[in-house]
Image (spheres, rainbow, N blue to C red):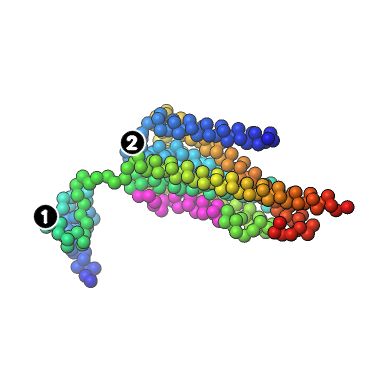
């Protein structure tokens, strides 16, 4: 086994161990919040907010990789841009599915057209559009550039989401952002901190996994081009 | 079909509605009792719904919490499974092509 594979597997092992501890801490150590915040369902926060943060992280990687690809295209930059858009969709789905279930208890409805919720959904839809474009429009240079441009533009929506509550108000709580009251118990703060650590690690290993796949796909594309030059049958 | 104004007058007289339509001094929706006129006859059941005091909560916090975690893990494992399958397919194809290309290049003088 190559050294990079060993490091990759070790990273997955560490991430799994941190998640196991997070689950234990959230369910057995963190206290239940007040009924107005959803009571027991408030524990969704320890995955929901870190998933949102992980989406921002993947969005930032998408912005950097896509911008770098537009400036000077390489397979590696394209691989990271592709991987980060896919991971942003995964974390966005985690956030968009867990949030409404918490909202049902705290607000009485699964969904409301609150500014933060609406902008978040739009942002996830932009990343879904990038993934769909790459999946169905082929892997040519023009398609790669178009997807990279969309990746740069999509990421500019992320700061708007983050500051949506402060700019336009709405139902979404501002507990852990600027002006919020914070978490009222040390174990709640620790649970959220472990959540952020676990999701950061998960974002790193997922990005790494997806980038490896995208690099392999680029390598396959080059081999297919070489095979075509040598007259190897296309259906080989 | 009733006209809008007739319908509104009927709604305003009905104690089963909230303060907005029932007029000042009326009770909130959740605290009102069904009016004595509501007999539970089939005609009442099919024309309107009336709130009762102390209605049971239907959304369990435990169920919502467990559902949220299950859905999140399902998204994650689905994403991992798709990635693993894609990686395996690409690796297999790369291996086949490399073998074929090496064979051709060795034959070429």
Residue A119 within the segment the image draws in magenta: yes
Labelled pair 1, 2 in contact (Cβ < 8 Å): no
Tell me if I can see residue A153 in this picture. no
Residue B51 coordinates in the image, percent (x, y): 21, 52
Q: Which residue is identified by label 2? A: A34
Question: To which chain does the residue with label 1 belong?
Answer: B
The number of callouts visible is 2
**Residue ID at (39%, 52%):** A112
Real-space CA distance between mark 1 and mark 2, rounded to the nearest whole angstrom: 38 Å
**Residue ID at (71%, 47%):** B95
Residue A135 coordinates in the image, percent (x, y): 60, 56
Q: Is residue A72 left or right of residue A195?
A: right
Does the magenta stretch mainly form a helix, a strand or a loop? helix
Q: Which residue is identified by label 1? A: B36
Q: Nearer the viewer, mark 1 or mark 2?
A: 1
* Image quarter in which the C terminus of chain A is found: bottom right
Classify residue A99 by image quadrant: top left
Vertical comparison of A79 with A199: above or below: below
Question: To which chain does the residue with label 2 belong?
Answer: A
Residue A155 coordinates in the image, percent (x, y): 57, 49
Which portion, as a residue range, is magenta?
A109-130
Residue A230 within the segment the image draws in magenta: no
Q: Nearer the viewer, residue B71 or A84?
A: B71
């Amino acid at each position: 086994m190559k050294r990079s594979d060993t490091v990759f597997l070790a990273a997955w092992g560490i991430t799994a161990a941190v998640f196991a501890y997070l689950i234990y801490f959230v369910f057995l150590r963190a206290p239940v919040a007040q009924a107005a915040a959803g009571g027991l369902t408030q524990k969704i926060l320890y995955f929901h907010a870190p998933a949102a943060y992980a989406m921002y992280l993947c969005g930032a990687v998408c912005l950097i990789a896509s911008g770098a690809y537009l400036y000077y295209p390489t397979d590696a930059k394209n691989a990271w841009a592709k991987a980060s858009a896919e991971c942003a969709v995964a974390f966005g789905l985690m956030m968009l599915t867990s949030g409404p279930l918490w909202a049902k208890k705290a607000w009485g409805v699964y969904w409301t057209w609150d500014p933060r919720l609406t902008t978040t959904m739009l942002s996830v839809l932009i990343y879904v559009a990038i993934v769909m474009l790459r999946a169905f429009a082929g892997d040519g240079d023009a398609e790669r550039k178009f997807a990279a441009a969309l990746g740069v533009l999509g990421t500019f929506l992320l700061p708007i989401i983050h500051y949506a509550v402060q700019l336009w108000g709405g139902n979404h709580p501002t507990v852990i952002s600027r002006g919020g009251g914070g978490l009222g118990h040390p174990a709640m703060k620790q649970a959220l901190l472990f959540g952020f650590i676990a999701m950061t690690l998960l974002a790193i290993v997922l990005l790494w996994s997806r980038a490896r796949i995208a690099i392999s796909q680029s390598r396959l594309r080059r081999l297919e081009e070489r095979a075509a030059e040598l007259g190897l049958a296309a259906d080989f | 079909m009733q006209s809008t104004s007739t319908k509104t007058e009927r709604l305003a007289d009905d104690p089963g509605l909230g303060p907005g339509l029932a007029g000042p001094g009326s009770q909130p929706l959740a605290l009102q009792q069904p009016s004595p006129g509501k007999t539970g006859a089939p005609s009442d059941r099919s024309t309107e719904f009336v709130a009762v005091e102390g209605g049971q909560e239907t959304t369990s916090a435990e169920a919502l919490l467990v559902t949220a975690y299950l859905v999140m893990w399902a998204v994650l494992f689905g994403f991992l499974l798709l990635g693993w399958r894609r990686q395996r397919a690409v690796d297999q194809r790369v291996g086949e092509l490399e073998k074929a290309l090496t064979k051709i290049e060795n034959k070429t003088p």
